[in-house]
Image (cartoon, grey):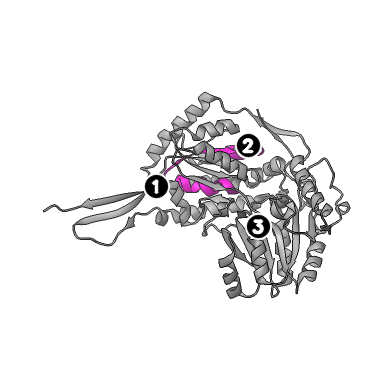
Amino acid sequence: MIQCISPVDGSLYCERPEAADHEITQALERADAAARSWASASIDERARLCGALVDAFVAQGDTHRDELAWQMGRPVRYGLGEVRGFEERARKMIALAPEALADLGMPEKPGFQRFIRRTPIGVLLTVAPWNYPYLTSVNSVIPALMAGNAVLLKHSHQTPLCAERFVEAGRAAGLPEGLFQFLHLSRAQTAKLIKEPAIGGVAFTGSVPGGAQIEEAAAGRFIPVGLELGGKDPAYVRHDANLAHAIENVVDGAFFNSGQSCCGVERIYVHADVYDAFVEGAVELTKQYVLGSPLDEATTLGPCVRTSAADFVRGQVAEAVAAGAKALVDPAGFAENREGTPYLAPQLLVDVDHSMRVMNEETFGPVAGIMKVQSDEEAVALMNDSDLGLTASIWSEDVDAALALGDRIATGTVFLNRCDYLDPDLAWTGVKNTGRGCTLSRLGFEQLTRPKSFHFRVSTK
């Protein structure tokens, strides 16, 4: 059985049986058949049905909000934000599809007709995580359907209801039978499924070790494998930053979703000229968070997803303090902060360096380290000193300086004066151990299709 133990109170929230072998086989056969038929559907028909799916999903927003709180701990006051993000991304990718999937014409050549057509890959397996279960899965599911593929969706054991709700919206929209299905699978079953010839591609969001397991399962298949594997994302507050704006947004970028975001801010570098003021303001703002049950509308910081995740963060902090770091936020100021539970107070650390795990290993919790820097050059060197590279944010009033710095930072996205946001018009991608591939934007359709060249001699006279 797949069990979801709620971080709210440690209770068993829901459980589901793992799919039996014959159920997996049947689902794959249905998906393969549906994909062959769906590939011939017009873009307009795909858009109509995908749009109806979005409508059906959004209509159940309150249900999604409440179930997210119980399954992974996000405060109910923020739950509808994921529903809105889902809708924004889905509708944008539907709108981009006609142009992104159009034939690519070549320069005229007398006697020839030449073009490149984007053809579907067949059946896509989307493997989605628990931290943003709808936002991560919509990045591949809707574009894959728009590109003419069928989709099998496998969600984390922590959020099994999210897979079911997403597919239910597809059924309500009238998607063809078998085109969009969910499967509750173990890791071993997922690896076995990837090896099936009918699987035409994989979209995975999760940890670096998880990505390595996906790659191993797909070895020798020669199929597209998209991997979004996390980050240790830095923020750099320059001397000319709007300090109030930087403090408000960097702190939010560090602690939203209890710090459980691949693109959350985990490392903060602040120019010496504004360091003291930034630290003071960040600490005061952090103290205003309300740690508590995600079911309470007053809560602004929910629990970590499970006690083991909170304990991992506690371990990083304890090691850093033992090595000379200073913790600036007193956990005693948060009544719900308790050892042995997933309820963890937010923390800011100073006197940190890159020898500490809290600065060189993904934390995925409500903690950030702050380092003083003397120059842009020092900041860039520190920002690049990581084996991950998803996003980086610069806080400055000088756009030209930010552009110059952005060209030197090894990352998939460079932000200026904002962070922790995915613009569906832009490519979502990373470098180094953050993975490979791309979702969103026009480029997001490329790993969901194959180019097929047509080279016709139209006259032999």
Q: In the rendered view, would you say 64 is above or below 252? A: above
Please state which amino acid type lies under the numbered disc 1. Answer: Arg
Alpha carbon separation for disc pair 1 and 3: 32 Å
Residue linked to disc 2: 160
Q: Residues within 10 Å of mark 2 (few under 14, many from 20)?
A: many
Residue 445 visible here:
yes
- Circle 3: element type: strand
- Of the image marks 2 and 1, the number of the one nearer the N terminus: 2
What range is drawn magenta here?
135-163
Task: Tell me what residue is drawn at x 73 percent, y 60 percent.
Answer: 251
- Circle 2: element type: helix
- Circle 1: element type: strand
Image location (x, y in percent) of residue 53: 51, 45
Dots 2, 1 in contact, CB < 8 A:
no
Task: Tell me what residue is drawn at x 49 percent, y 30 percent.
Answer: 27
- Of the image marks 3 and 2, the number of the one nearer the N terminus: 2
Q: Residues within 10 Å of mark 3 (few under 14, many from 20)?
A: many
Task: Tell me what residue is drawn at x 67 percent, y 60 percent.
Answer: 234
Q: In the rendered view, would you say 90 is above or below 192? A: below
Task: Tell me what residue is drawn at x 56 percent, y 67 percent.
Answer: 407
Residue linked to disc 3: 233
Please state which amino acid type lies under the numbered disc 3. Answer: Asp
Q: In the rendered view, would you say 208 is above or below 404? A: above
Image location (x, y in percent) of residue 330: 87, 55
Image location (x, y in percent) of residue 65: 67, 46
Q: Nearer the viewer, residue 69 or 18?
A: 18
Q: Nearer the viewer, mark 2 or mark 1?
A: 1
Residue linked to disc 1: 450
